[in-house]
Image (cartoon, coloured by chain):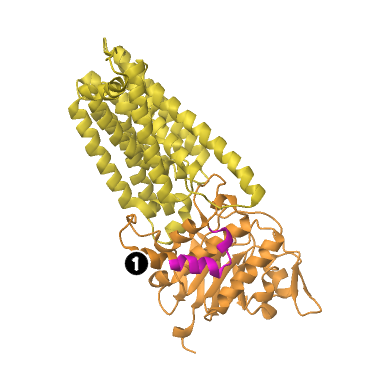
């Protein structure tokens, strides 16, 4: 991408920063990216608390053959993503009994087997459909800048629906995540809550995949909430922080991609990684100093 | 005394799981504010008794009455602390958040910021009161995974108390605690009973709590036995129940000590 340079320095800065907005594809990417950032940070907050990153990863893998099937049938890949991911959520809910269960290990072996088969199936379908392999990279690593106005609108609607549904699950989901038995005893339908949550993860993963590709989903689903939870252990504050971090990563990533012509996925993932390293180092340092002066218990940023 | 005044009344209760009789012919009456322990070997059906009191399980014969009615109808007045391992060290929630789950964790939805201030303030006051009552105030704001096992157990008891139950069911709350924490948590639970709350607690070692107990239920090998500690805890009874030699000692200050119970020192889980 080349940019026309203007005379005055101050004008040049404004001109540079405003440049992305003049391109419709950048506007679509920013709108879709912002919606996806909010949704995935909130869904991902629970993924991190439940330690179900592996299930989320598997749902992304399962979405891949969905996209290739849809594309080879001439349907919109987005429908394939959603259909396969949601079906995958059902399968994962059926084979496993959730976080901190005793069968967790056997469960992850079963999920791994299903997941890798799904990925292989996607590869087969991609190789069967002539001339389609060129698209495979964008399914895997995202097509941040190839989002149409319709797709952007769809992602905004999906993100809003997921956030509303997540808020409705809210407290029982948190309860079932940290203390499944006690939650069950207090009347929370733990199995149904888990299935509902996995479906939300599937939808979030499928939507985020439109943007980041199935392999880079975690850059928005796990990294921002992990950063937020390292910063604070107040639930409301850490959810808000996760959303802020996620949005900042998307904007910075898209901006960096625009100016450097390197993939946005690379920027989002590696900026997130850098922030994560800084935050973890910071909290390790803080743990040392707090121990030294027996200071504040749980600081919020 | 009519049955309406009893916290729990079991009349000739037997429990089956499939073809197997877990235990049979248990009769016991528990009065409000009593501290009752359920003791017995692995897999003898100690937790089964709690499930019965929660209404999660129906007896195969006999009658179960909880707080003067059916167990399932008493649920709102009963708190249950299931057997658990400790919180994961990486869990980034505060003790106060864990306690709060006991108050409205089962209610759908999420509190919206800046809406319903009064209600939120009431909830916070109740949570703070429950935390204060178990002496956990000083560490309730720390990440729950970072506090000790004994402190986690106190927070969980606060979580069970925040609903203001009349009956508190505890499943092995002393498991995997060190001895000082076992003593501290035992005395805390005894204090809960003095506030009029009935406590039924599953334990694998009766010694730390024996001094506080009003009543004991022993379950072993399909049999069950209930009564006052001094009547039930005898070498003869326990030897018969466990099928191996068990000694009961009386110390000079009037305390009982049980020795030789096969699994007393072992670590175990539940089905």
Residue lying furthest right: B252
- Determine whether, in the image, residue A141 is placed left or right of residue B214: left
Q: Is residue B39 depicted above or below B250 in this figure? A: above
- Label 1 sits on a secondary structure element that is helix
* Image coordinates for residue A162, horizontal then vertical, percent: 29, 42
Residue at image position (44%, 77%) is B67
What's the magenta bit mostly, secondary-structure-wise? helix
Rendering quarter of residue A195: top left
Q: Nearer the viewer, residue B173 or B269?
A: B173
Tell me: A268 left or right of B221.
left
Check the picture and name the quadrant holding the N terminus of chain A. top left
Residue B77 drawn in magenta = no
Q: Residue at x 44, y 42 (%)?
A: A96
Residue B85: in sight, yes or no? yes
Q: Which chain is orange?
A: B
Q: Is residue B264 left or right of residue B154?
A: right
Q: Is residue B138 magenta?
A: yes
Give the residue at mark 1: B118
> Magenta stretch?
B125-140
Is residue B103 shown above or below A7? Answer: below
Q: Which chain is yellow?
A: A
Looking at the image, which residue sits at the far top? Answer: A131
Could you tell me which residue is drawn at 33 percent across and 28 percent down?
A: A209
Closer to us: B48 or A285: A285
Q: Say whether residue B60 is visible.
A: no
């Amino acid at each position: 991408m080349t940019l026309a340079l203007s005379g005055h320095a101050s004008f040049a800065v404004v001109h540079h920063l405003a440049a992305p907005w003049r391109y419709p594809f950048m506007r679509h990417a920013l709108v879709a990216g912002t919606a996806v950032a909010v949704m995935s940070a909130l869904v991902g907050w629970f993924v991190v608390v439940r330690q179900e990153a592996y299930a989320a990863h598997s749902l992304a893998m399962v979405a891949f053959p969905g996209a290739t099937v849809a594309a080879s049938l001439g349907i919109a890949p987005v429908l394939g993503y959603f259909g396969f991911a949601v079906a995958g959520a059902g399968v994962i809910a059926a084979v496993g009994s959730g976080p901190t269960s005793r069968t967790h290990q056997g469960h992850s072996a079963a999920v791994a087997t299903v997941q890798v088969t799904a990925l292989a199936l996607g590869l087969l379908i991609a190789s069967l459909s002539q001339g389609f392999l060129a698209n495979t990279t964008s399914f895997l690593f995202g097509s941040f800048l190839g989002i149409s106005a319709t797709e952007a609108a769809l992602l905004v609607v999906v993100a809003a629906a997921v956030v509303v549904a997540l808020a409705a699950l809210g407290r029982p989901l948190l309860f079932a995540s940290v203390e499944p038995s006690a939650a069950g005893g207090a009347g929370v339908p733990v199995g149904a809550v888990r299935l509902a949550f996995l479906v939300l993860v599937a939808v979030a993963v499928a939507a985020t995949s439109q943007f980041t590709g199935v392999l880079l989903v975690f850059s928005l689903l796990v990294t921002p909430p992990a950063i937020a939870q390292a910063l604070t252990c107040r639930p409301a504050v850490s959810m808000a922080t996760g959303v802020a971090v996620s949005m900042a990563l998307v904007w910075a990533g898209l901006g960096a991609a625009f100016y450097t012509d390197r993939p946005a996925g690379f920027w989002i993932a590696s900026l997130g990684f850098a922030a994560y390293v800084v935050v973890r180092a910071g909290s390790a340092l803080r743990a040392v100093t707090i121990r030294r002066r027996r200071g504040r218990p749980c600081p919020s940023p | 005394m009519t049955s309406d005044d009893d916290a729990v009344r079991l009349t000739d209760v037997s429990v089956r799981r499939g073809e197997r009789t877990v235990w049979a012919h248990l009769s016991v009456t528990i009065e409000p504010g009593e501290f009752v322990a359920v003791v017995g070997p692995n897999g003898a059906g100690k937790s089964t008794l709690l499930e019965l009191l929660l209404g999660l399980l129906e007896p195969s014969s006999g009658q179960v009455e909880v707080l003067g009615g059916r167990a399932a109808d008493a649920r709102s007045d009963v708190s249950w602390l299931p057997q658990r391992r400790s919180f994961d060290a990486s869990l980034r929630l505060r003790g106060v958040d864990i306690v709060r789950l006991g108050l409205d964790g089962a209610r759908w939805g999420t509190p919206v910021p800046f809406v319903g201030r009064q209600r939120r303030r009431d909830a916070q006051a109740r949570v703070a009161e429950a935390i204060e009552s178990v002496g956990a105030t000083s560490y309730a704001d720390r990440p729950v995974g970072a506090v000790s096992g004994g402190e986690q157990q106190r927070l969980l008891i606060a979580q069970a108390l925040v609903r203001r139950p009349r009956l508190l069911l505890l499943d092995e709350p002393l498991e995997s605690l060190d001895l000082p924490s076992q003593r501290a948590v035992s005395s805390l639970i005894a204090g809960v009973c003095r506030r009029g709350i009935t406590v039924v607690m599953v334990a694998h070692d009766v010694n730390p709590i024996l001094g506080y107990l009003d009543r004991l239920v022993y379950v072993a090998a399909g049999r069950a036995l209930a009564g006052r500690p001094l009547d039930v805890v005898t070498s003869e009874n326990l030897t018969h129940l466990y099928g191996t030699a068990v000694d009961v000692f009386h110390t000079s200050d009037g305390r009982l000590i049980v020795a030789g119970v096969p699994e007393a020192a072992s670590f175990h889980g539940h089905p």
